[in-house]
């Protein structure tokens, strides 16, 4: 067979759901990688599929998964002002006020902050999806 349909489907599903993504929990990531690797090796050993067909199945499954994510969109995981203030407070920076500024550059979100002691801070938030888009455009 030119492709392993099960492997292609599982890889596409995992890619769409983001189970193995950057924010995924470590045990699930390891379990799925081991399961896919075992299936890969077992399929090759029992001559159910060739090495080339298994590699193509991985690649095509990933491409299909990324295409579905691109077409369907993704959930906005950007932190709002409250989450930013909470993250700063967890690091010992207690804010009295946080306001969104209009950035000169599109690579980050800019905020003006005032601490409880009256100091003024410039807060720049670099969103993961913005960084990836910037890298893609630059390439």
Image: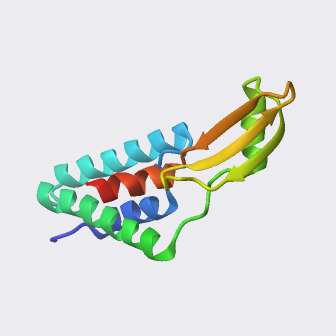
Quarter of the rendering containing residue 86: top right
Question: Visible in this render: residue 64?
Answer: yes
The residue located at (72%, 35%) in the rendering is: 87
The residue located at (68%, 46%) in the rendering is: 111
The residue located at (46%, 68%) in the rendering is: 69
User: Could you tell me how many numbered marks the image carries?
Assistant: 0
Residue furthest to the bottom in view is: 71
* Residue 80 in picture, x, y percent from top left: 72, 52
The residue located at (67%, 50%) in the rendering is: 79
Quarter of the rendering containing residue 30: top left
Left or right of 101? Residue 12 is: left
**Who is closer to the viewer here, 134 or 35?**
134
* Residue 40 in picture, x, y percent from top left: 27, 51
Quadrant of the snapshot with the N terminus: bottom left
* Residue 104 in picture, x, y percent from top left: 53, 53
Question: Visible in this render: residue 50?
Answer: no
């Amino acid at each position: 067979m030119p492709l392993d349909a099960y492997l292609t489907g599982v890889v596409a599903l995992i890619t769409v759901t983001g189970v193995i993504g950057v924010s995924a929990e470590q045990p699930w990531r390891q379990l799925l990688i081991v399961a896919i690797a075992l299936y890969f090796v077992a399929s090759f050993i029992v001559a159910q599929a060739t090495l080339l067909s298994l590699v193509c199945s991985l690649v095509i499954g990933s491409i299909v998964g990324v295409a579905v994510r691109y077409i369907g969109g993704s959930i906005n995981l950007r932190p709002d002002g409250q989450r930013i203030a909470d993250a700063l407070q967890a690091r010992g920076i207690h804010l009295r006020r946080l306001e969104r500024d209009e950035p000169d550059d599109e690579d980050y979100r800019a905020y003006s902050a005032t601490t409880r002691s009256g100091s003024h801070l410039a807060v720049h938030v670099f969103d993961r999806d913005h960084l990836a888009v910037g890298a893609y455009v630059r390439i």
